[in-house]
Image (spheres, rainbow, N blue to C red):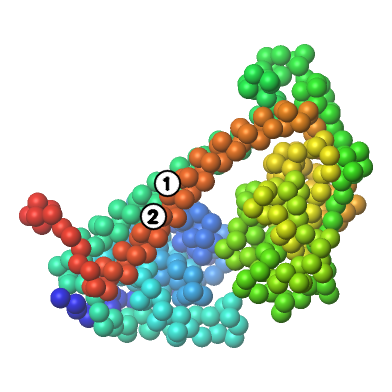
């Protein structure tokens, strides 16, 4: 049977303020907005490091952000008792009246049913900074929800998915660390024809030589990108200027236009990609990309780079990007994109990027970058190693996406009472 749910019957909102500056030597667990977004864990800070009053919070409280409710931010406080906990006043401190309902309420506060109401009632002077009033939260009544006897089982099912998501994300973080180490080895030791990394310089110093990029295999070279392009007949092409391609010309269908934000971890995402009609793309033919090119962000996050393959043929290099056209195969596009994202190149870029608020690159800066060069066959061996690892990483990331989708579907079904959770008789008895 579907029941209504009134938050005023289930939670209290507390506003117990404390000024940490009055306790300068005391260490606190600090639940801040940046800590939520960046780490998912509270910071450990001294009272003297905090410059304004905060809420003092108890263990098992639920924190829900009142700022920009289009972004879901719900935090469960789990204090180990060693330090006092405080939180930003941008959070609403929600305390369950019955602690046995905490797990269920945590999931309920994350649901679309709650957030749709919060978004509709948020107010502010700009779209980027809107807030709802804390009193709104406790006055929410949902017309449809699950039977109370099902709440523990629903919480258990959704929490189980949360644990799987967290474990898989931990695995992804571990893989990314392994990949960083693998890239360091591949771009400083290379891969021999028999498919093995060269021994380290400590093990076999005679296999290496010093260079402008540090120690590299003695068969390798270091050249400026401008020299490489001149030798292979390639060039660097800046994306169209704003006067050539206007925002109102973007369509939902047509030729994809690759912007910096579309390039992530060497992959071009089409989730939010802009498009233009074929006729306009033909007008900008010199910016259309071909297999063997590399598209590179020239402003913002400057490590974004991706090789162009068959699936991107004819796409357009957008404003804010370069097309690196490599001509003859002195430098393979996959190798160039990978090494560009590595510290060997990024350290150079950090020293010469133009601008402070949004760093950017130009053709002169790009052409002066030093690239490591090995024979084309070794380049392919190196990128093959990375491709194999990227497949594993992609598979694991896909698993997280599927788990998130599965949880989202379950939340919609179970928290509205539309579908009852299935519970084994043995579990009911327990």
Q: Dot 2 corresponds to which residue?
A: 403
Q: Please indicate, yes or no, whether residue 31 appears anywhere in the rendered image.
A: yes
Mark 2 vs mark 1: give the one in front: 2
Q: Decide which of tag 2 and tag 1 comes sooner along the chain.
A: 1
The residues tagged by marks 2 and 1 sit, at their Cα atoms, a distance apart of: 9 Å
Q: Position of residue 294 (x, y in %)?
A: 75, 49
- What is the secondary structure assignment of the residue under circle 2? helix
**What mark, if any, has residue 168 been given in the picture?**
1
Dot 2 and dot 1 residues touching (CB under 8 Å)? yes
Q: Quadrant of residue 314?
A: bottom right
Q: Nearer the viewer, residue 166 or 406?
A: 406
Residue drawn at 23 percent across, 69 percent down: 419
Residue drawn at 22 percent across, 81 percent down: 4
Q: Is residue 348 left or right of residue 45?
A: right
Q: Residues within 10 Å of mark 1 (few under 14, many from 20)?
A: some
- What is the secondary structure assignment of the residue under circle 1? helix
Q: Position of residue 382 (x, y in %)?
A: 67, 31
Q: Is residue 376 above or below residue 346?
A: above
Q: Please indicate, yes or no, whether residue 259 appears anywhere in the rendered image.
A: no
Q: Work out which quarter of the rendered image holds the N terminus and state it.
A: bottom left
Residue drawn at 43 percent across, 63 percent down: 86
Q: Is residue 34 left or right of residue 166?
A: right
Q: Is residue 19 left or right of residue 101?
A: right
**What mark, if any, has residue 228 been given in the picture?**
none
Residue drawn at 30 percent across, 53 percent down: 160
Q: Is residue 184 left or right of residue 362?
A: left
Q: Is residue 113 above or below residue 335?
A: below
Q: Quadrant of residue 217?
A: top right
């Amino acid at each position: 049977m579907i029941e209504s749910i009134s938050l005023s019957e289930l939670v209290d909102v507390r506003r117990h303020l404390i000024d940490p500056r009055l306790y300068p030597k005391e260490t606190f667990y600090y639940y801040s907005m940046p800590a939520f977004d960046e780490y998912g864990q509270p910071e450990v800070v001294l009272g003297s490091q905090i410059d304004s009053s905060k809420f003092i919070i108890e263990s098992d409280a639920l924190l829900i952000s009142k700022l920009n409710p289009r972004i879901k931010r719900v935090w469960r406080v789990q204090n180990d008792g060693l330090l006092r906990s405080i939180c930003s006043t941008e959070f609403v401190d929600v305390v369950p009246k019955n602690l046995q309902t905490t797990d269920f309420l945590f999931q309920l506060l994350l649901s679309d049913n709650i957030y749709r109401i919060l978004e509709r009632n948020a107010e502010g002077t700009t779209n980027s900074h809107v807030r709802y009033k804390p009193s709104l939260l406790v006055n929410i009544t949902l017309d449809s929800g699950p039977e109370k006897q099902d709440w523990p089982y629903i919480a258990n099912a959704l929490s189980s998915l949360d644990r799987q998501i967290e474990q898989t994300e931990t695995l992804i973080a571990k893989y990314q660390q392994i990949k960083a180490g693998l890239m360091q080895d591949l771009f400083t030791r290379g891969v021999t024809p028999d498919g093995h990394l060269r021994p380290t310089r400590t093990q076999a110093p005679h296999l290496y030589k010093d260079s402008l990029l540090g120690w590299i295999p003695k068969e390798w070279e270091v050249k400026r990108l401008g020299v490489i392009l001149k030798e292979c007949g390639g060039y660097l092409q800046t994306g169209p200027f704003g006067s050539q391609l206007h925002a109102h010309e973007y369509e939902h269908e047509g030729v994809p236009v690759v912007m910096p934000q579309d390039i992530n971890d060497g992959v071009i995402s089409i989730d939010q990609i802009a498009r233009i009609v074929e006729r306009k793309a033909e007008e900008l033919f010199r910016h259309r990309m071909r297999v063997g090119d590399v598209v590179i962000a020239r402003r913002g996050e400057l490590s974004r780079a991706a090789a162009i393959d068959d699936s991107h043929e004819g796409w357009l290099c957008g404003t804010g990007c370069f097309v690196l056209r490599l001509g003859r195969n002195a430098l393979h596009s996959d190798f160039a994109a990978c090494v560009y994202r590595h510290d060997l190149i990024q350290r150079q870029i950090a020293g010469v990027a133009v601008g402070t608020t949004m760093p950017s690159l130009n053709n002169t800066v790009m052409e002066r970058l030093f690239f490591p060069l090995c024979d084309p066959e070794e380049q392919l061996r190196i990128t093959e190693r990375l491709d194999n690892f990227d497949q594993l990483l992609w598979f694991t990331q896909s698993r997280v996406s599927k788990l998130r989708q599965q949880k989202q579907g379950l939340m919609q079904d179970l928290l509205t009472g539309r579908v009852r959770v299935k519970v084994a008789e043995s579990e009911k008895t327990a």
